[in-house]
Image: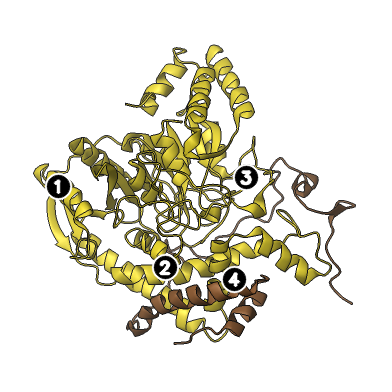
Amino acid sequence: MSQWLPIDDIVEQVQAGKLRAVDLVEQALQTIEATAEFDAVIATTADRARQRAAEIDARVDRGETVGSLAGVPFIAKDNFLTFGSETTAASNILKGFEAPYQATAIERLEEAGAICVAKANLDAFAHGSSTENSDFMTTKNPHDPTKVPGGSSGGSAAAVVLDMAPFALGTDTGGSIRLPASFCGAVGYKPTYGLVSRSGVVAMASSTDVVGPLTRTVADSAIVLDVLAGVDPLDSTTIERDDDCYQVSTASLKGMRIGIIKEYMDESLSDEIRQPITAAIEKMRQAGAIIEEVSLPSLPLALACYYIICPAEVSSNLSRYDGQRYGFSDTEANDLFSSYAGSRSKGFGKEAKRRIMIGTYVLSSGYYDAYYKKAQTVRTKLIKEYEAAFKDFDLLVGPTAPTPAFAIGSHTADPLQMYLTDIMTVAANLAGIPAISIPAGSSDGLPVGLQLMAPQRADRTLLAAAAKTEEILR
Amino acid sequence: MATLSRDEIFKLAALARLAISDDEATEFEGEINEILQFVEQLQSVDVSEFEPTSQVTGLTNVSRDDAVIDYGYTADDLLKNVPAVENHQIKVQRMVG
């Protein structure tokens, strides 16, 4: 049972003066301290949070309407630029970096009255599926501290499940919100590509990066998305939001056409995932959904496609870390090349270097066509298959991950095995479609996530259907 | 397709402005070749009827007015994180000669 009320109840009570923002912030900070052994949080932003809470309470006392997230504490993944603490992306190369401005997502949340209380751990630069690639520490799964929380937004997912705050922010480039949500038993929402600004977010793979919430309920995710969504002049890839609020009432599943993704449910899927997922889908059928199998033949290629496109874009985005303008700088270097190479070699962790190397290779003259361009073309084939599937189905459904949370250390020696963890999440990023992971039972005490996907810009439909699914799975 | 040799791993590192040790080169050689072998499966896919996708929502040439906007911070604020500053400028190693 959570210590936090649903977000809309918190807001109502703060606005009515029945709950004080300063108390909510203390409650969050105390919980962060009490659960410190899980290493979900890199740093708190306590001073700034207390100050903002006092300001919000004063505004309430003056009779002002604060906003749709009045007084609600939250935790941001440490790849969002924020005031009140360093922003490190859990990397040594950014240790000590103090943001001169905040991410648009943070600004919008603050404008609505939300209060950032801490920065969550992640795989450095969001490269990973377990938080074990963090240069600082590995977050432990709240259900079993010997297991990973998933990644890369593992600190954010663990923070929500450990009850540190009503919501956390994450980023999802190939599954980094949905996978930890699945492993930790949270709701993780990946919006349509471009619906939320990435300005002020440490860039990973720009053609697939999205910002989204991790929460306890679908309704809470919808409230947060409604604040985040919309065009931002500072991010030219943002798209127009819906005029209607994303905070939608629960939709009936009756008559809704839902396709079970055949490629995610084939004979290779373990029973520990198949059983709870099949049971959840059966309940959706009983609730009136029309469930049929659907095949997207190129889905098995999505991971290979992603692990060309992602490192290519990573190598380009990480070229800015040169030791000259910000971040770690190798002071022993005595010429420009060794200053670049020394700063980058000492500052980047192993996974960042690996991705930079692969990206540099697939973009290099002579290999560009065979790797990068080919992957971008297979991406088109996959997108066409999604478009065809969405002619017959309103939503697609399947598991979020092929396994429950795995043991800390079990995948670190084999990067490819770690990459395979993302096998069911990367396709939604390549196609830019919205997708959500909601808790759907457990296997040996570890949570299992159900993944729902919808066509681009159908975020409201997806959230409404997910809210109903969540209700029938309770 | 190609398998990267140890020399090519060093060359790649230099192109990416990374200095890697012998041990790292050995490790990367194994791992990167394994990953390249995994992505090899794309080579046999027939994509003759498709064009590459780099932008998924259909936006093209998004532009803005060429105007100065005040975002509330100064050049000196942006210089706070710079490792070496002299006369409000970023100090770097000699580039030529």
Q: Residue at x 72, y 62 (%)?
A: A343
| Host chain of mark 3 | A
Secondary structure of the residue carrying tag 2 is: helix
Q: CA distance from mark 1 to mark 2?
A: 31 Å
Query: How far apart are labels 3 and 1 at the CA level?
Result: 42 Å
Residue A425 — which label?
none
Determine which residue is flagged by label 1: A279
Which amino acid type is marked by label 1?
A: Ala
- Give the colour of chain B: brown
Residue bearing the label numbered 4: B24
Q: Colour of chain A?
A: yellow
Residues at circles 4 and 1 in contact by the CB criterion of under 8 Å: no
Q: Is residue A39 above or below residue A317?
A: above
Given contact means CB atoms under 8 Å apart, are the residues at marks 3 and 2 in contact?
A: no
Instruction: Please tell me how crowded label 1 is: few (under 14), some (14-19), or many (20+) other residues with Cα within 10 Å.
Output: some
Q: Is residue A251 above or below residue A307?
A: above
Q: Nearer the viewer, residue A253 or A313?
A: A313
Label drawn at residue A87: 3
Q: Is residue B23 left or right of residue A247?
A: right
Nearer the observer, disc 3 or disc 2?
Answer: 2
| Rendering coords of residue A340 (x, y %) | 73, 66
Upstream in sequence: badge 3 or badge 2: 3
Tell if the residue under mark 3 belongs to the same chain as the one under mark 1: yes
Of the image marks 3 and 1, the number of the one nearer the N terminus: 3
Apparent side of residue A248 relative to residue A175 in the rendered image (left or right): left
**Disc 1 versus disc 2: nearer the observer:** 2
